Amino acid sequence: MKEDILYKLLLLRTPKIGAVKYNELIKQFGSAKNAAESLKNTSVYDSVLREIEQAEKLGIHFISDDDDFYPVNLKEIKNHPPVISVRGNLDTLLKDAVSIVGTRHATVAGMRLISEIAERFASNNYSVVSGMAIGSDSAAHMGALNAVGNGQTIAVLAGGVDYIWPLENESLYHKIIDRGAIISEMPLGFIPKGQNFAQRNRWIAGIGEKLVLGEADLASGSMLTARFALSYGRKLYAIPSHPLDARAVGPNTLIKNGLAELCMGADDFFHKEKKNDFEKIKEEKIKKDDSLLDKIGTIPVSESVLAEVVKKSVAEIKSELVVLELQGLIRKQDGGYVRL
């Protein structure tokens, strides 16, 4: 480990010293070493040594903003973290990056689309950046990891890189370490609080060269991330949804106000890939049933309403619904059917 990392951490782990104060001290004393020695804080020194020792045991790296591995887009942000900790593959930080976020309470259809977009970006050698929350974030990470080849993703945490949150994503956490990177500006073992998540959102927006917003209500953390992205001059894309769904208000509002481009899927960013024979057969089968499938959306529709719309009896459409459900195209929910 570089010697200057020790002194930089001594500054950053001192209470009331954040990025702003850190930069002031470096300017005042000329180096992190001189600034750290001026504080004469022995209690912090001992805790930083313990943190460094623990990081070495876990294979965690400390990357400062003068290191080649430090994300180039993040470095452009004013008062960015002077040092980040990284667990996983450092090369993930060198790729072009796209940030993808959305609500924790996403619909099945919303998560599926986010996963497909993330997978396409990862297949085109992008690192997909998100916050490892359940719902939309998880879909983005998993989509990237499902990409053919070496699909990679970056999870930005509000706590220490060794603190898994939420616990439901423990399996995802380890998959990201194997193929991507977990990063944070917080000390090892740090348990996040509310304000830390807002700061985390800043860095998610900062690392990506563009941001894709999925379902999100107006007051959500995902909308905050979108506002950060706009303030950094990032290109913003939003996925629309049904106006009566509160999770659609965020992206729909951004599109309506001209702040975000309409995103309909991965083909908005990359040329449509040629279909293989299996996909062609599947598509032909779907076309046969599209008169019914087209009438099913993200809001549950009952069998009686569907029968009336397609002008068939309930008995006639039951077998078609079973086939569509077995194909994974629809799902029964709340007394009706939704499209996946």
Image (cartoon, rainbow, N blue to C red):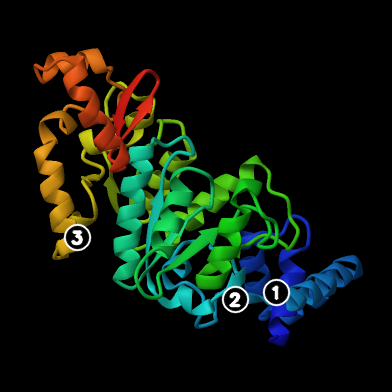
Q: Earlier in the sequence, mark 2 or mark 3?
A: 2
Q: Which residue is mark 1?
A: 8
Q: Which residue is mark 3?
A: 278
Q: State the image coordinates of residue 20 (x, y, percent, origin top left).
A: 61, 60
Three-letter amino acid code of the residue under disc 3: Phe
**Lateral position of residue 130 relative to residue 84, left or right:** left
When the figure is inspected, residue 3 is found, relative to residue 150, above or below; the finding is below
Q: Quadrant of the N terminus?
A: bottom right
Q: Earlier in the sequence, mark 2 or mark 1?
A: 1
Q: Are marks 3 and 1 in contact (CB under 8 Å)?
A: no
Three-letter amino acid code of the residue under disc 2: Ser
When the figure is inspected, residue 49 is found, relative to residue 153, above or below; the finding is below
Residue situated furthest bottom in the rendering: 2
- Residue 3 vs residue 176, the one in the foreground: 176
Q: Which mark is residue 64?
A: 2
- Residue located 21% across and 46% down the image: 264
Q: Quadrant of the C terminus?
A: top left
Q: State the image coordinates of residue 285 (x, y, percent, origin top left).
A: 14, 46
Distance between mark 3 and mark 1 Cα atoms? 55 Å
- Residue 121 vs residue 327, the one in the foreground: 327
- Secondary element at tag 2: strand
